[in-house]
Amino acid sequence: MDTGVSSDIRVEKRESYGSFLKTHFRDYGMLVSLLVIMAFFQVMTGGTLLKPLNLTNLVLQNSYIVIMALGMLLVIVSGHIDLSVGSIVGFIGGLAAVLMVKFDIHFVPTIIICLLVGALIGAVQGYWVAFLKVPSFIVTLAGMLVFKGLQLSLLGGQSVGPFPVTFQRLSSGFIPDVGVIDTINLTSLTLGVVTTAALIYFSYRTRLNQQKHAVETAPFGFFVFKNALLAVLLIGFSYLLSTYRGLPNVLVIMFALVALYAFVTNRTTIGRRIYALGGNEKAAKLSGIKTERLTFLTFVNMGVLAALAGLIFAARLNTATPKAGLGFELDVIAACFIGGASAYGGVGKVTGAVIGAFVMGVMNNGMSILGIGIDYQQVIKGLVLLAAVTLDVYNKKK
Amino acid sequence: MHRAEPASRPAFLIERDEMAAILEMRGITKTFPGVNALDNVNLTVEAGEIHALVGENGAGKSTLMKVLSGVYPYGTYSGDIVFEGEERRFKGIADSEKLGIIIIHQELALVPLLSIAENIFLGNEQASYGVIDWSRAFARTKELLERVGLKESPDTLVTNLGVGKQQLVEIAKALSKRVKLLILDEPTASLNEKDSDALLELLLQFKAQGISSILISHKLNEISKVADSITVLRDGSTVETLDCRGEAVSEDRIIRGMVGRAMEDRYPKRESHVGDPIFAVENWNAYHPIHADRHMVKDINLHIRKGEIVGIAGLMGAGRTEFAMSLFGRTYGQNIRGRVLLHGREIDVSTVSRAVANGIAYVTEDRKTYGLVLDETIVKNVTLAHLGGVSSNAVIDEMRELAVANDYRNKLRIRSANVYQQVVNLSGGNQQKVVLSKWLFASPEILILDEPTRGIDVGAKYEIYTIINSLADAGKGVLLISSEMPELLGMCDRIYVMNEGALIGEFAAAEASQEKIMHSIVKSGRR
C-alpha cells in the first residue's frame, strides 16, 4: 500500500561507526551480552568461572546443547519445531548402553548404529511433518512421549553402565599432547592459534573480495577491533584450556560442526533454500524448491545430531540413566530463540544459536557456582529468554 | 476545472449554494522519518457525492485516508479536519466510526470462519449484558444484506463467499454502523467486471440515499462512470480537483494530472517479429484439488510462436490462473492430463523444478503470497529460482550473485537503495520487477505472466510493458493473462478468450476489440 514510507529510500553514503552499529546491532548485541554475562559471573564467582578446570567443564556441559542447537536452528528456520530431541538423547543413550554393556558390541559399530537410528527417528517424524502435513508441534510432542517411554523400557527403569574406556573418551578425552612443556598442552595451544589465524585470514579475504565488488563493508577500525577481539578470545580460551588438560575431543567435534553448519547455512544452495522455505513456503515452492523434501531432510538432520548428542551425554556420565535428556529440548529451543531465530521461520543464524547456547550454559554454570538453587535458576533463565526475544521484537518494530 | 486553494473554500462551492461540504480536509501535512508523505493536501467532499481520489502508488492516497479515519491520530499530522461543519480531532478509528466515517480497506478485514452475521456485528454485537441476541442480529443482518443486494443466509460462513460477495458483506457492515461517509480503497481491484458494476451501482444507490463516498481506484473507466468530482494527488500534494458533473472528464485528462505529463501512449510501441510456433499445449485438463468432480480446465489447446505475445482474456474465475498453475509443475488441481510441447518435443512439466528446467516460468498474480520471500533481500529473491546459476557444487558464489542482482536492478530499473534492501520495503511496481528478475534469471523460453500489472501505478506499468516487449523481441514466447482488456489489446499479437475453464475464442490483434471479446464470452455463457 502506498503509505509513502515505501518510497523512502535511505541512501547510505559511507558507513559510519554509529550507523553501522545500529544496523548490525542484532549481530553483535548477543555476543556483547554473552561477554557481559561472563564478566558478571567471573566477578561474582571470584574468578572461578574462567579457571581452566571450570572452563573445561563448561565446554563439556554444553557441547551436546550446542550440537543440537545447530539442528534445531535449521528446523526453526524452516518454520517448524522439534520437541522430541530430549527424549531422543535419552533413548539413544540407553540404546548405546544396551548394545555395549549387555551385548558387548564394539563402540564403533555402536556409534554407527545409534546415528542411523537417530536418522531413522528424524525421518519418521519428518515424514509425518513434511508429507502427511501434521503440525510439527504435534508430531514431535508425540515423539517426545514415545521415545521417553522407549528409553524407560530399554533401560528397565535402571541405570546401565559403565562403558568401555574408549567410548568414554568421546566426552572425557582430550586431544593428545606432543608434550614438550609440562605445564602447557602445546598441541592445543597451537591448534587454537592456527584456527584463529585461519579465521582471520578468511574474514580478511572476504573483506577484500567485497571491497573489490564495491559491497558496503564494516568500517576498517571496526573490522580490526572485531578480529582482534576474536583472536584474544580464541587464543585466550585455548591457552586457558591448555594449562589444564588441553582441548577436549568434544570441543573439536563441536567446533568442526559449528563451522560446517555456518558454512552450509551461509554459502550453500540447500542452506539458502531452507531460509526461503521458512520465509515463504508458497513462494519457495513456486520457485522450484522441493519444500517437502527439504523439510523432511531438516528433521533427519536433527535426528542425527540428537543421536550424537545422546552418545556424548551418555559417554560423559559413563552411564545411561532413565532421566537422561529430560528437558534438554527446552534448553536447545531457548538457545535458538535467544540467538535471534524467529518463531515464524525464515530468520536465524548458526552463530546466534551457538552464542545463545553459551548464554544459557554460562548462566547455568555461574549460578550453580554461586549456589543459587535450581528453583531460582529456572526463574532467571526463563526471564532471560523472555527479555532476549522481547528485545528482538522491539528492535524489529523500530 | 477547479483548483482547491489551501484553507479557503473553492470558488465553485459558493456558486452551488444548495450544496454543503460534509468533509473538508485543509492543509494536511504528514511526515514520516525522512519523507513528506503528505504536503499541504486539501480535500473537500460535498454531501451526497461520490468523490474519487486518484494518484499513482505512493502519491499519498492511503495516508490521507488514514489521517481521516484516525489511524494516524490528531497531533501526528498538521492541518484541520472539518466533518459536518465541526472541526474534529480523532484519537483513533473508533472516534471517526462513531461519526459515520467508515473505511473499507483493499485487503478485506473479515474473519473467514465466522458467519456473515457474526462478521457484520463484530465488535458491535447485538447484545444485552454481554449476551448476544441472535434473532435480532439475524434479522438486522437480513435487512442489511437486502440493502446491498446480497442473497445469502446470515449464517453462511464468510470463507464460503467469493471476493465480490465478501466486499458486499464489508459494505453491509459499514451500513450497520450508520455510515455517512463511506471510503472504499480499491474496492474493485479483485472483482470481475460484473461484480464491479454491481458495486458501482450500489454506490449510486447510496448516493441517492444521501450517503457520500470517497472512491480510491486505479480503474479510471469506473471513476468516470460514477464520480461527481475527482481529486488528483501526486507526490503527496493535491494537484487539482476535477468536476465531472458538467462535461465528462476524459481518462487521458486524469492521467495527465496523475503523472504530471500527457501519456502519449499507455502501451510502448513494438514491431513484432513473430516466428514459428515453439510452444504448444494439447488437450490439457485439470480438476479441482478438493472436489475431484469439478472440471476446472477443459481441453485446452493453444500454441505460442517465437517472439509472440499471446493473451488470455476472460472474466475473473474463468479458470485462467488454474490453467496456468496446473501447467506449471501441477501446482493446481488433480487428475491433470494433456501434453506440453516445446520445439515439437514433449516436455515434462510435472514438478516446478522440471518445468523450470524445461524452459517454462510462471509469474504469479499474487506476488506477495506466491512470488516473493518478503523479508529477504532483493539479491536472495532474484536468484531463488536458479541458484544453480550462481553456485558451483552447491556452494554459492556471493560475488557472482551480487553481480547478477545488480545487473537486473539496472536493467529493470528497480528503485532501491541497493540490492541488499528487503523486498517488503519496495513499492508494488518494484516488487513486481524483482519477481520478473527472478524468472528472467532462470532464462525460460516461455513466460507465463499472470496479471503482471495488478495494483501497480501507471508509470510502473509502462515499464513492465517495456520489459515484456523486450522479452518478445529476444525471441521468447509470452503468455499474458490479464483481466484488463485494454492491456491485452495494447500488448498482444493474438488473444485467446477463456470462459468456464475452456478456450472459446481466438482473435488476431488486428481484429480483436473489447466488444468482440465480451460478446464471445457472453455468447458462450448462454450455451
Image (cartoon, rainbow, N blue to C red):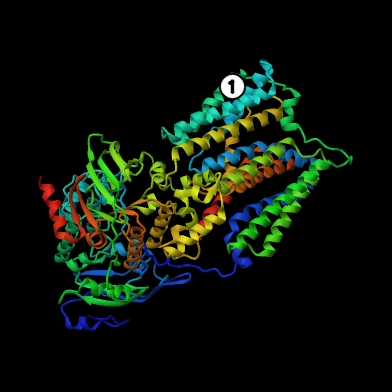
**In front: B65, or B354?**
B354
Q: Nearer the viewer, residue B453 or A124?
A: B453
Q: Mark 1 lies on which chain?
A: A
Q: In this view, does B280 lie to the left or right of B29?
A: left
Q: Would residue B507 appear left or right of A275 to someone viewing this image?
A: left
- Please, what secondary structure does the residue beneath circle 1 have? helix
**Could you say which quadrant of the image residue A93 lies in?**
top right
Crowd rating for badge 1 (residues with CA inside 10 Å; few <14, some 14–19, many 20+): some
Q: Position of residue B354 (x, y in %)?
A: 40, 41
Provide residue A198's location: percent of width, then percent of height.
72, 50
Please state the horizontal and vertical placement of residue B378, each as a whole percent of the image. 47, 57
Q: Is residue A313 above or below residue A367?
A: above
Q: Mark 1 points at which residue?
A: A152
Task: Please tell me which residue is depicted at 63% across the width and 42% down the height of the picture.
Answer: A260
Kind of residue at disc 1: Leu
On the image, the x and y values in percent for residue A187 come to: 81, 41
